[in-house]
Image (cartoon, rainbow, N blue to C red):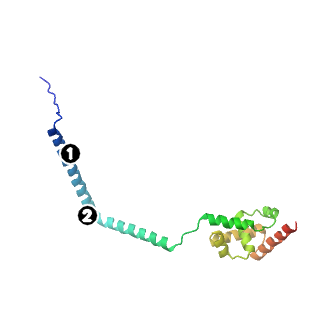
Amino acid sequence: MKSEVIRFESGKGHMKHILFYSLAMALLVFALKWLQWKYLITDNSLEIYITLIALFFTALGTWIALQLVPSTQSTGANEKVSANLLQAPLPNTAELEMMNLTLREQEVLELLIMGCTNAEIADKLFLSISTVKTHVSTLFVKMEVKNRIQAVEKANRLKNQHRHQ
């Protein structure tokens, strides 16, 4: 038996067949995918519509929230306020070290001395009122006082001691 070898000739006729079958396969795959999508849409149309509506209202709600809520200021402003407060005369540093006041508590104390309310302190230091209340109550414990008046009096007393030394 003779073995036969199949040779492909590089003629234009073969190339046309290859392109024709490739194009036919591509169209067939496209048609199948389109039918699959069509049945997917009809079978799951309710879920798809509900999802699209949910996405729309989520985007709408986010946009409305961004329009209603004013943008917050950068932390750079917070650092400027802190720097300005640190330039104000603070009570005796030896006494402060004994009380173990944090930098933020010192800022709150300085604003208390200036007569600021919790809301004003919160605005100036860019904190929530709840956080200011926590700092104030921690100050009371560390300074061993019971109220704002006593805290301010003790801080002023420490300032006067610092000036006389």
Q: Residue furthest top?
A: 1
Which residue is rendered at x = 66% and y = 71% of the image? 124
Tell me which corner region of the image, top left, top right, bottom left or bottom right, holds residue 15. Answer: top left
Where is residue 35 drawn, in percent x and y? 23, 57
Q: Is residue 124 above or below residue 9?
A: below
In this rendering, the label closer to the viewer, 2 or 1: 1
Q: Could you tell me how far apart the alpha carbons at marks 2 and 1 are, in whole angstroms?
A: 30 Å
x, y (%) of residue 126? 63, 69
Which residue is tagged 2? 42
Q: Work out whether residue 147 can be spotted.
A: no
Q: Residues within 10 Å of mark 1 (few under 14, many from 20)?
A: few
Residue type at the position of mark 1: Ser
Q: Residues within 10 Å of mark 2 (few under 14, many from 20)?
A: few
Amino acid type of the residue tagged 2 in the rendering: Thr
Classify residue 139 as left or right of residue 66. Answer: right
Q: Secondary structure at mark 1?
A: helix
Instruction: Identify the residue at horizontal 77%, vertical 77% (top origin).
Output: 149
Where, quadrant-wise, is the C terminus in this rendering? bottom right
Earlier in the chain: of badge 2 and badge 1, it is 1
Name the side, left or right, on which 73 lies relative to 107. Answer: left
Residue at screen point 71% across, 63% down: 103
Q: Is residue 122 above or below residue 98?
A: below
Q: Quadrant of residue 164?
A: bottom right
Residue 146: where, in percent of width, then height? Answer: 76, 74
Q: Is residue 110 visible?
A: yes
